[in-house]
Image (tube, helix red, strand yellow):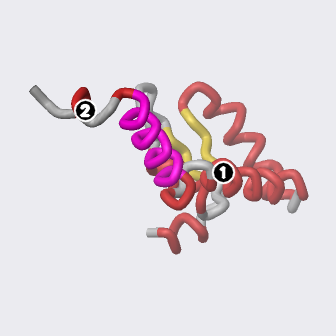
Amino acid sequence: KRELYAKSHVLIAPSRYETFMLTGLEAMASGTPVVTFDEMVEKVNKLYSLWKSGSQEYWEMCKNARKTAERFDWAVIIPKLEHMFHTVVKEHGNNQMQSH
């Protein structure tokens, strides 16, 4: 799957109602720019033009896609979640954390 994203020049996500687009994050993690519904026509045309002309701006967009996806990497998310859970338990105690 990752190999396909890495070989792609752009991921077009035409869904209007995507709550958390994991597919988009996977594509961005591979350095593939993502175009969503609201920006489709304008962005697809721009990306195509940039890619076709060999523009540095296209490659910057690829690099920025990777940086965006890195914020959602499990190696980043898990420590934040652990910290949040430890804070809640510390502030509210184990008694209030048990289900009723």
- Which residue is identified by label 1? 33
Magenta segment:
77-91
Taking depth in this image into account, of 48 and 94 the one nearest to the observer is 94
Q: Quadrant of the N terminus?
A: bottom left
Q: How busy is the neighbourhood of tag 1: few (under 14 within 10 Å), some, or many (20 plus)? A: many
The image quadrant of residue 97 is: top left
Residue lying at 51% horizontally and 53% vertically, measured from the top left: 79
Q: Secondary structure at mark 1?
A: loop
Compared across the picture, whether 70 is left or right of 64 comes to: left
Q: Secondary structure at mark 2?
A: helix
Q: Which mark is residue 22?
A: none
Report x, y in % for residue 70: 62, 55
Report x, y in % for residue 40: 61, 33
Compared across the picture, whether 42 is left or right of 72 comes to: right
- Which residue is identified by label 2? 97
Q: How busy is the neighbourhood of tag 2: few (under 14 within 10 Å), some, or many (20 plus)? A: few
Furthest residue in direction left, as rendered:
100
Residue lying at 61% horizontally and 41% vertically, measured from the top left: 35
Furthest residue in direction right, as rendered:
56
